[in-house]
Amino acid sequence: MWDRVILFASYPGSIRELVFEGFREAVTDAGVTAKDIDASVVCSAPEYDKQRSPSGILAEYLGLNPQPTFYVETLCSSSSTGLKLAYSLVASGLHDVVAVMGFQKMSEISSAESQERMGRGADIQWESPFGTMMPAYYAMYAQAHMEKYGTRLEDLAAIRVKSATYGQINDRAVYRKPVTAEMFADPADIMAGPVASPLRVGDCCANADGSSCIIVASEEKARLFCKKPIWILGFGTASASVNLTGRDLFTGLRAAEQAAAAAYKMAGVGPGDIDVAEVHDCFTIAEMMAYENLGFAKPGEAKDLIQSRETYREGSIPVNVDGGLLSKGHPIGATGGSQIRTIVLQLRGEAGAMQVKEPEIGLVHNIGGVGIYGNVTILCNQ
Amino acid sequence: MSKPKKEADVRFGKFGTVSFTTLTKVNDFIDHLENGKVMATHCKTCNTTFFPPRADCCHCLSSDMTWQEVSGNGKLVTYSRLKFAPMGFDGDLPYCIALLDYGDYRVFGRLDSALDDSEIRIGMPMTTVANRLPNGQLNYVFKKA
């Protein structure tokens, strides 16, 4: 498995051109050509696109006709779900080499329009008419977590401060400036601006344009083409009620817990075996809950994990040492592929300034909507 | 001669500041709201109560439902006060979205805009009350019990 990602605050081209950039990097890195790829999986959240059925136009533009192409959508975790589909296609013997392409072009609409579209990733009949948006849903989880466990605003800010530490050294990140705890403490600072209580501007990731591409191959083909293939050890995927009325947990994401348990079981490893992780930090509270849902911390103890800096690069479980979505930006359909890219580079020892010391097993946690779709993928380098 | 076109039942278009749904089999919810009642549906076959209301039971596959009023107190599970709104909701700012737990079911909605932050406590008992919005649309809000 090999992969590449391209992220832009605003990409000066069309969707097919944006996807071409990620695709070109991935096939070049993998040493394959379009002819070697016998199926493609395209992943995005379709409400941003004018182009209907993007898999068709992308297969054409990338020279992937007449091979079959599939379209997969699970909101923000579309490309993790696409990866699982590609794995299934290869593991079943139906195909040998599958390209998984995630993309999103979000910069052509305003932030309010984007919030309205993303808000419609909730229950449009019974929730959206109240004026819902993604930050407010995650804010409800933050409120419940703070109430039950005594998590403080300072603990949430500490997640963003860590993120910015690595965003500054990731040349693919959209937000590359330093962020400090003092900025959150200063009401006049943009980071401290209220969005949806208790979340502030600095607790939220930004929209971005981006594309990612992962090449998935059978073991035989991977050994033939690639010098440093990375192996898929386990997948876990789960779903939860869209409407919050159907949920029984508000201090964590049940679908993430269930996906993690399934992924650990399939991989035959536990949380203590993970050397480096990418978690879905669309909001600071989302990374907090991920620590607990993945078993890196007990429920309520995520704040201690961040405050003791155990999730920094030198800590016991480095998390989002590429700056995460909080720094990279969050191009919905491309995001899962971007997280996979970071873990692939880490496991190959090619992560440059962000490199963790000799990791062997890595984990990706990618969430669609507000915990509707949970995806956990475990990778290893031998 | 062509048959007269049957008028579509678009009552649900009145739900919330902006409704994203017009046609639904649970349109009577809106009539109940007009009459000051917030209703759940109850499956006559397996006795499950659903909020939000649904026309079909996923447990026993029956569509034989009856309306049941959301009454008594629920407990505030969590909430958030919005300072930014999605397109179409700016005029309502600031407002709080929230979730109440009634034991057998939960209700997602808005807190009464008259409530001050200092009065809001997770776990507090609240009631669900039908509400008319300034633009003539209908919704419901949670008030202190």
Image (cartoon, rainbow, N blue to C red):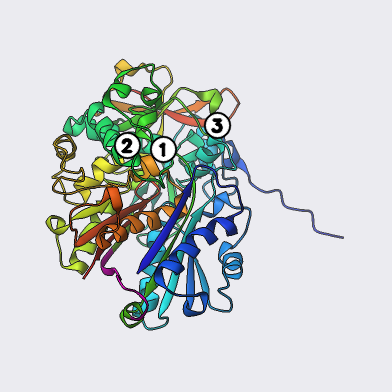
Q: Secondary structure at mark 3?
A: loop
Label 3 and label 1: CA atoms lie apart by 35 Å
Tell me if A299 is positioned left or right of A182 in this view: left
Q: Nearer the viewer, residue A120 or A111?
A: A111
Task: Indicate yes or no whether the magenta region holds residue A228.
Answer: yes
Q: Nearer the viewer, residue A314 or A203?
A: A314
Q: Which residue is mark 2?
A: A164
Q: Nearer the viewer, residue A325 or B103?
A: A325
Point out residue A83 in the picture as x, y percentages from the top left corner: 38, 66
Q: Secondary structure at mark 2?
A: helix
Q: Quadrant of residue A250?
A: top left
Query: What's the magenta region?
Result: A224-235
Q: Which residue is mark 3?
A: B17
Q: Is residue A198 above or below residue A210?
A: above
Quadrant into which the N terminus of chain A falls: bottom left
Say if mark 1 contacts mark 2, CB within 8 Å.
Answer: yes
Task: Indicate yes or no whether the magenta region holds residue A102.
Answer: no
Tell me if A14 is positioned left or right of A25 in this view: right
Q: Residues within 10 Å of mark 1 (few under 14, many from 20)?
A: many
Label 1 and label 2: CA atoms lie apart by 8 Å
Point out residue A212 in the picture as x, y percentages from the top left corner: 45, 58
Label 2 and label 3: CA atoms lie apart by 38 Å
For badge 3, the amino acid type reads: Thr
Q: Would residue A72 be seen by someone viewing this image from the given angle? A: no
